Image (spheres, rainbow, N blue to C red):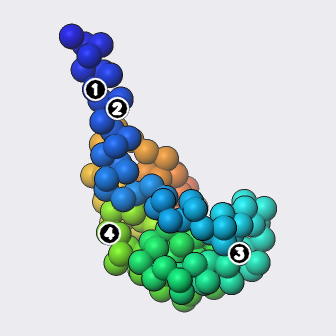
Amino acid sequence: MLRSLIFALAVALPLSAQAMGTGPAPTSLANPDYAQAEKLIKEWKYAEAIPLLQKVVKDDPKNADAYNQLGYASRKLNKLPDARIHYAKALELQPEHKGALAYQGEMFLMLDDVKSAETNLAKLDKLCTFGCTEYTELKKAVTEYKQRKGITS
């Protein structure tokens, strides 16, 4: 009985995460510009990734993953106004986008807005019932930020 329950959960959880739209959209995976942009981002070539991602969102304006990656690349280039716009668009399209919530939270910390980062952390806590990388990474960033700033709360 317990094995059956564990198996059912193992099968259902990835499907439910996919249904929530928190993973890469199939169109993102199939789009060569998106794939090339992700490769460039992994190589820290953020400026080169941005035009490819801009093309992706021009062709597919509802692609939350591409907006999230645009936000990430912009944030890494310290273009925080652009990052803010892209994360907001990703979350407008997909309010439960875990990656956008986590990355936006990290941007909030760069802007010394720990309260907004903690709001995103609380959202991730609700979304990540059994834990997730996005929650863990943002929690770590918030904790380190508070330690650096001497915040005790």
Q: Secondary structure at mark 1?
A: helix
- Report if the CB atoms under discs 4 and 2 are less than 8 Å apart: no
Distance between the Cα atoms at labels 4 and 2?
24 Å
Question: In the image, which is nearer the foreground, mark 4 or mark 2?
Answer: 2
Residue 11: assigned label: 2
Residue found 66% across the figure and 67% down from its top: 32
The answer to whether the residue labelled 1 contacts the one labelled 2, judged by CB atoms less than 8 Å apart, is yes
Left or right, 100 with reference to 116? right
Q: Secondary structure at mark 3?
A: helix
Query: Which residue matches tag 1?
Result: 8
From the top left corner, tell me how far across and down residue 120 is, in percent: 37, 64
Give me the C-alpha separation between circle 1 and circle 2. 5 Å
Residue type marked 3: Ala
Can you identify the residue that label 3 sits on?
49
Which tag, 3 or 4, sits closer to the chain's start?
A: 3
- The amino acid sitting under disc 4 is Pro
Residue at point 38% right, 41% down? 14
Relative depth, front residue between 13 and 72: 13
Name the residue located 39 percent from the left edge and 63 percent from the top edge. 97
Mark 3 or mark 1, which has the lower sequence index?
1
**142 lies above or below 115:** above
Give me the disc on residue 95.
4
Q: Quadrant of the C terminus?
A: bottom left
Q: Position of residue 85 (x, y in %)?
A: 48, 86
